[in-house]
Every structure is written in C-alpha cells, then in structure tokens.
Image (cartoon, rainbow, N blue to C red):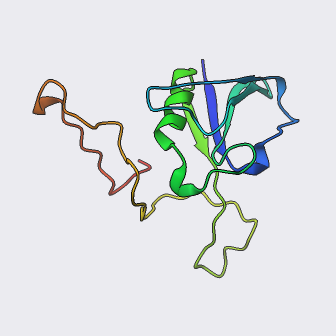
C-alpha cells in the first residue's frame, strides 16, 4: 500500500483538503522532526505532511534536522516522499509561481550531516557510497 510523505513549506500548514486529518508527534534516533506529521487522506491516498521549517516557520534552513524529517516519514510507513521548495531561477523563462520538476542539482550545503551512513558497521563490505551524478534516476 502506498503512503505518501510530503515535505513542504509554510503553505502546507493547514491542509483543509485533507480528510480524516490528525497530528502525529514523532521522535527518531536523529531527534525530533521539524513538526508533527499532519496525517490523513487526499483523494483516498494516505499522506503525511511535514512542515520543513516548523509550523510557525521558525527553523532556518541551516538548522533543519533533515535526517529526523526523513526518518520520521519512513518510521511512519511512508513509501514515497515528495518535497516542495520555493526558490529562484537563473532562467528567464522560469517565472515565479512556475512548477518545475528538477532532474539535477548542486548541493552547496555546509555544516550539517549529509548522510545516514556514519559508520561502516561490520567492515568495509557495508560501506555505502551514494552516487550523485544522476541523483533522480
């Protein structure tokens, strides 16, 4: 059964289009996620919505606990995750409000953990190397 996790900005704080909505507080081994999960159904599909910057938009991007957010959705049983973001573009034909599905990105993040694989438990045969050349394949 499919359960969709949605990570969004402050625009998803009060999803009135969700039925059977309830909040679920989560705690993971990585700490608390940015917000409780708003759980329910959209057109019959089970969903869990997480507010990336907190429901009051109080968490700056450099302080978001991304591992806790992903872990909370996985522990809740989400089989797929959709993340939205608002940002600018260097291309004139992409206007504010346009919907774009990316197929490549450059990660300039610093000062935060970028992996779930911090140790190679059991030796080097358990090493995990995530290729980033084609991140969405």
Task: Point out residue 35 in the picture as x, y percentages from the top left corner.
Answer: 66, 36
**Residue 34 appears left or right of 132:** right
Horizontal side of residue 44 vs 101, given as left or right:
right
The one of 102 and 128 positioned closer to us in this rendering:
128
Residue at (60, 74) in percent of width and height = 89
The answer to whether 90 is drawn above or below residue 15 in the figure is: below
Which residue shows up at 60% across the image and 79% down it? 91
**Residue 51 appears at what percent x and percent y?**
68, 42
Give the residue at the far top of this rendering. 1
Q: Residue 57, image x and y in percent? A: 71, 51
Q: Quadrant of residue 98?
A: bottom right
Residue nearest the viewer, comparing 31 with 96: 31
Q: Position of residue 15 (x, y in %)?
A: 82, 37
Counting labels gives 0
Q: Which part of the image, by quadrant, shows the N terminus?
A: top right
Q: Residue at x 51, y 43 (%)?
A: 65
Residue 26 image-quadrant placement: top right
Residue at horizontal 69%, vertical 28%? 47
Residue lying furthest right in this view? 16
Along the viewing direction, whichever of 24 and 49 lies nearer the viewer: 24
Residue lying furthest bottom: 92
């Amino acid at each position: 059964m499919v359960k969709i996790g949605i990570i969004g900005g402050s625009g998803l704080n009060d999803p009135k289009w969700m039925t059977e909505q309830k909040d679920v507080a989560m705690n993971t081994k990585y700490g608390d996620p940015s917000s409780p999960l708003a759980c329910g159904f959209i057109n019959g599909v089970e969903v869990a919505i997480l507010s990336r910057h907190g429901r009051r938009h109080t968490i700056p991007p450099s302080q978001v606990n991304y591992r806790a957010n992903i872990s909370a959705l996985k522990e809740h049983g989400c089989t797929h995750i959709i993340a939205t973001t608002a940002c600018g573009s260097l291309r004139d034909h992409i206007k504010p409000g346009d919907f774009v599905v990316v197929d490549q990105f450059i990660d300039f993040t610093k000062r935060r953990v970028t992996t779930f694989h911090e140790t190679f438990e059991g030796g080097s045969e358990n090493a995990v190397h995530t290729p980033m050349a084609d991140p969405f394949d």
